[in-house]
Structures are given as structure tokens and as C-alpha cells.
């Protein structure tokens, strides 16, 4: 009984020593390790924000620029009173 415990303890100690010396070192030269490092560096490479891709961000910026330009031109029409017909004409203009 004692001999069996001593053998088990010796084998366990030897196994632990081998595991400690071996460690968990990765092989830097393999393709799988490089892919793992790339994924770990950027887990969601297709996303630019929390939920949008680059194309979605570009589309949103394009729509925003277009709307801002049209609203600016509409505001200029109000400033220079070109958003309605002139009241100086003799003929009645429905407005």
C-alpha cells in the first residue's frame, strides 16, 4: 500500500515537473498561431462601430451630407424669400 502511494506520488511529481517545464508556449511560426493572434488583435474586423460595418458608416455619412446640403439650400431660400412667389405681381397667385 505504501509502495503504491509512493509510486503514484513520484509519477505525479514527475508529470507536474514536465508540465511546468513545458509550459503553454505557442509556436510563433505556424499559420494557426498567426491567425489566432490576428483574431485576438481584432475580434470583429468587419465592424467599424458597435453594430455597423464600414459600408454602413459610409452610407450614413453620405445620407447626412446630402440632407444637410438640401436643408442648407432650403434655409437660404427662406432667408432670401425665394421659397414663395412674389406678392408684387398683378395677377393673383395661389399660395
Image (cartoon, rainbow, N blue to C red):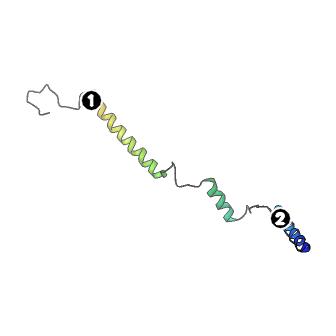
Q: Is residue 45 left or right of residue 7?
A: left
Q: Position of residue 66 (x, y in %)?
A: 36, 42
Q: Position of residue 15 (x, y in %)?
A: 83, 67
Dot 2 or dot 1, earlier in sequence: 2
Q: Quadrant of residue 4?
A: bottom right
Front position in the image: 44 or 11 = 11
**Element assignment for label 1:** helix
Q: Which mark is residue 4?
A: none
Q: Give the mark toward the camera: 2 or 1.
A: 2
Residue picked out by circle 2: 16
Residue picked out by circle 1: 78
Front position in the image: 84 or 22 = 22
Q: Is residue 4 left or right of residue 91?
A: right
Point out the residue furthest to the right here.
3
Point out the residue furthest to the left here.
91
Point out the image quarter for the C terminus. top left
**Element assignment for label 2:** helix
Mark 2–mark 1 distance (CA, rounded to whole Å): 82 Å
Q: Residue at x 48, y 52 (%)?
A: 53
Amino acid at each position: 500500500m505504501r509502495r503504491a502511494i509512493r509510486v503514484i506520488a513520484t509519477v505525479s511529481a514527475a508529470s507536474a515537473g514536465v508540465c511546468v517545464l513545458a509550459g503553454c508556449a505557442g509556436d510563433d511560426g505556424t499559420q494557426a498561431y498567426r491567425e489566432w493572434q490576428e483574431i485576438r488583435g481584432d475580434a470583429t474586423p468587419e465592424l467599424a462601430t458597435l453594430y455597423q460595418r464600414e459600408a454602413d458608416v459610409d452610407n450614413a455619412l453620405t445620407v447626412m451630407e446630402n440632407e444637410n446640403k438640401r436643408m442648407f439650400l432650403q434655409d437660404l431660400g427662406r432667408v432670401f424669400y425665394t421659397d414663395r412667389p412674389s406678392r408684387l405681381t398683378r395677377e393673383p397667385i395661389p399660395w
